[in-house]
Amino acid sequence: MDDPIRLPPPTQDEITSALLAHVLQIFTWWIGPLVIYLVKRDSKFASFRAMQALLWQCALMIFWMVVFALWMIGFSLVIFAHMGRTPPGNSPPPPVFFAFFGFFWLTLMGMGLLNIIVGIVYAVRASRGEWAQYPLLGRLARRIVEV
């Protein structure tokens, strides 16, 4: 962190807890970081790292909900527009449906891949004992944990 305040070096237990917070976010989403945050409240290093992972998972969940809502709205508009133009029966879905479907899944898979990359990168940095912070979310985590 670019802070003139000198932060104490973490212990091996704190490093392990922080590493777990980042790795568990890949597999358990927000549950693993929340558990580590609640269990390791006495450790500034571990709670700061767990809070960052928890905030990242909350932001990711909100992003996924927004993308899903936009996809549902777009999907509904395409289907309703298609229903008015075609006779009842077995008609194939319009080509625009596949564009919406592809965009939706590519976005979700891209964010899933980004989640894995963020978890691994910050787990490695935690294993080195670095007080690294996520872009944008790191400042908020510092205020919450009071580092």
Image: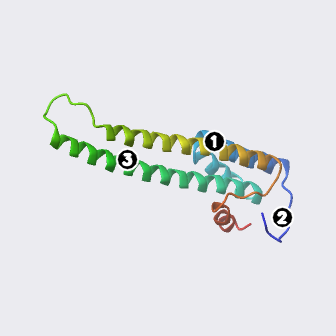
Where residue 112 sits, quadrant-wise, is top right
Judged by depth in the image, the label closer to the viewer, 3 or 1, is: 3
Can I make out residue 43 in this image? no
Where residue 137 sits, quadrant-wise, is bottom right
Foreground residue among 16 and 139:
139
The answer to whether marks 3 and 1 mark residues whose Cβ atoms lie closer than 8 Å is no
Chain-order first, disc 2 or disc 3: 2
Q: Which mark is residue 7?
A: 2
- Residue found at x 16% / y 43%: 84
- Residue found at x 52% / y 40%: 109
Residue 140 lies, with reference to residue 16, above or below; the image says: below
Q: Which mark is residue 116?
A: 1
Indicate the position of residue 118 as horizontal and vertical percent values. 66, 47
Indicate the position of residue 50 as horizontal and vertical percent values. 67, 53
**Local SS, label 3:** helix
Residue 120 lies, with reference to residue 58, above or below; the image says: above
Chain-order first, disc 1 or disc 2: 2
Q: Quadrant of the N terminus?
A: bottom right
Question: Which residue type does callout 1 highlight?
Answer: Ile
- Taking the view exactly as shown, the residue that stands out farthest to the bottom is 4
Judged by depth in the image, the label closer to the viewer, 1 or 2, is: 1
**Local SS, label 2:** loop
**Local SS, label 1:** helix
The answer to whether marks 2 and 3 mark residues whose Cβ atoms lie closer than 8 Å is no
Indicate the position of residue 10 as horizontal and vertical percent values. 84, 55
Q: Which residue is mark 3?
A: 71
Question: Which residue type does callout 2 highlight?
Answer: Leu
- Residue found at x 66% / y 62%: 141
Foreground residue among 43 and 26:
26
Chain-order first, disc 3 or disc 1: 3
Q: Residues within 10 Å of mark 3 (few under 14, many from 20)?
A: some
